Image (spheres, rainbow, N blue to C red):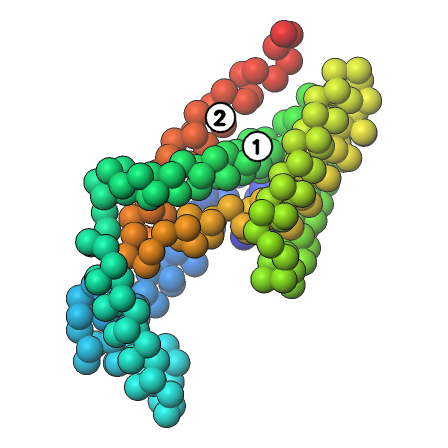
Amino acid sequence: MCLFGMLLGHEDVLGHSLTVLLFVPVIPGVISTVILLLMPETPKFLMISRHNVKGALASLRFYQGEREELQEELDKLQVEGKGGEDDEPKGGMKAILATRHLRKAFTISVAVLVLTLPFYPILQNSTFFFTHLDVPNSIAQLSSSLLMVLLTFACVTSTSIVDKLPRRLMLLTAGSSCMLSLSAFVIAAEFGFRYIAVAAVFVFVFSYGVGVGPVAWFISPELVPLQYRSAMFCMCYAVHSMLVVLTNFATVPLIGVSP
């Protein structure tokens, strides 16, 4: 989607008309909404949160088709739900903040998500960054599009290794690469090495797509019991969204400001 949006935003495509460009997402959005209206609730939610056995079975049949293993899948959901209820009380924001180990998991999850913050200003303002470095506008726009191609390739690569490598190793390796490439960008930009700075952004995007981006979002659900996963994800998403807004608004005005 990032790649598609970047290509459409090119000045020679739809970038010349903000009205048309913003209308494009309306079409798939309406189609997706209609499709969602026809889809039942997820089996896990129906079984664990609503204890609706009949509805959960119908949902499983809808998503997985008619097969012999459906009853076995339903039994697993029942055991999973009972296990969560026996171990701890129902999940929620208050329980997460009041329980020491859940609060620790929340803190770790937010810390991991902080690694993703530099990506969003680059996603939204890469062309501006490149032109600010005196890169010709045509090359800057092409570079921004190639960044999204690279991101797509990196995410596809990540799918083949994410279940084979330890989460900690991927985060440390990719996160360190992201920070080093950002440092290289700052130094190169400060001394006028514009194309080295551009190359550093490419290294950052690849490191983000391979490790930081995919891993950061499923760390929080993996750190907590099942009944807390939805609340934990929502809390992390809320904090992350606030940080994204703050950093995005601060990035562009700070470009070119001397220390």
Residue 67 located left or right of residue 44: right
Label 1 Cα crowd, 10 Å radius (few <14 / some 14-19 / many 20+): some
Residue at (65% x, 31% y) in the render: 179
Instruction: Report helix, strand or loop for mark 2.
Output: helix
Q: Which residue is painted at 67% across and 43% down in the image?
A: 173
For image coordinates 36% across by 52% down, the residue present is: 224
Sequence-wise, the earlier of marks 1 and 2 is 1
The one nearer the camera, 12 or 7, is: 7
Disc 1 is placed on an element classified as loop
Query: Foreground residue, 5 or 254?
Result: 254
Image check: 114 left or right of 70?
A: right
Q: Residue furthest top?
A: 259
Indicate whether 230 appears above or below 140: below
* Count of numbered circles on the image: 2
**Residue contact between numbered discs 1 and 2, judged by CB atoms under 8 Å:** yes
Distance between mark 1 and mark 2 Cα atoms: 8 Å
Disc number for residue 198: none
Residue 184 percent coordinates (x, y) = 74, 26
Q: Amino acid at mark 1?
A: Pro
Q: Quadrant of the C terminus?
A: top right
Q: Which residue is mark 1?
A: 118
* Residue 250 in view (yes/no): yes
Classify 10 Å Cα crowding around label 2: few (below 14), some (14-19), many (20 and above): some
Residue 138 visible in the displayed image: no
Up-down relation of residue 127 to residue 56 (above or below): above
Horizontally, is 85 left or right of 183 in the view? left
Residue 61, image x and y in percent? 32, 83
> Toward which corner of the image does residue 207 lie, by quadrant?
top right
Residue carrying label 2: 247
Q: Residue 230 in the image: state x and y as whole percent.
A: 31, 53
Query: In which image quadrant can residue 142 be found?
Result: top right
